[in-house]
Image (cartoon, helix red, strand yellow):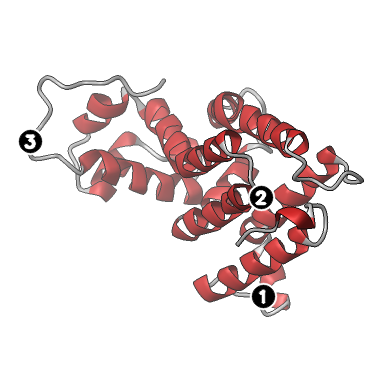
Amino acid sequence: MTETSRKAGRPSDSIDARQKLIDHARELFTHMAYDNVSTRRIANRANVNVAMIRYYFGSKEGLFETMLRETLEPMKKQVQLMVQDSSQKNFLDIMRTYYREMFKAPQFPRLVFQVMHMDSSDTQRKLLEKVFTDISQPMQMLMFEKLVDSNILRPDANPKLCKVSFISLMVFPFIAPQSLLAIHGIELSEEFLNQLLEHNIQLMTHGFLQTSDLQE
């Protein structure tokens, strides 16, 4: 259930209550099983009246779905920009946006990874697939179609394989087990992620992207 716009009766003393609920819901859902995260627990963590969850989101399901959508919104906007102006810079800025936003919520990709391994009948899985069907999947399909149409990919590159490489480079650091990262002496600090981001961009620009369209 998505949020219904409510203007009349909006509490004047709860301007940031909605964002607090989203932020704390994301934190709790990434560390606890969905069924163990009650609306009261979220409200208490956010220091907000539990009635505000129904006011803004309708239910726990609505809050979970809104949390997913709003976490992905910056990436959605960047993909839309790339579709409007299919330059290599706008394509690479999708990864830049993802790294920037996931540094703020590093457990979110792990949540997505865990939920997609749940049974298809689970509430979390249904809500996540709904959001991905509405947003992510169409964006990715359209994005790589535009890369081909705009001659941004090298002519000898396989678009499907390029998409897998792109997603892998973008997502893996955030879903890799912490123990595996520790073995290799990796800490997901802002400095490391910035270095990895630029390294990945170099791999792509000298790998499957046209060198004639290099843009910083």
| Residue 81 x/y as whole percent | 53, 39
Residue type at mark 3: give it: Ser
Residue type at mark 2: give it: Gln
- Figure check: 205 above or below 61: below
| Residue 156 x/y as whole percent | 92, 46
Q: Which mark is residue 98?
A: none
- Figure check: 126 above or below 37: above
Discs 2/1, front:
2
How far apart, in angstroms, are the residues tagged by discs 1 and 3? Answer: 47 Å
The reply, left or right, for residue 160 in relation to residue 101 is: right
User: In the image, what residue occupies the spot 63% across and 53% down?
Assistant: 92
Categorize mark 2 by other alpha carbons within 10 Å: few (<14), some (14-19), many (20+). Answer: many
Residue type at mark 1: give it: Ala
Front residue of this view, candidates 180 and 99: 99
User: Which residue, given by chain and number where applicable, does mark 3 sit on?
Assistant: 12
The reply, left or right, for residue 127 in relation to residue 88 is: left
How far apart, in angstroms, are the residues tagged by discs 2 and 1? Answer: 34 Å
Q: Secondary structure at mark 3?
A: loop
User: Which residue, given by chain and number where applicable, does mark 1 sit on?
Assistant: 182
Q: Earlier in the sequence, mark 3 or mark 2?
A: 3
Snapshot quadrant of residue 128: top right
Discs 1/3, front:
3
User: Which residue, given by chain and number where applicable, does mark 2 sit on?
Assistant: 88
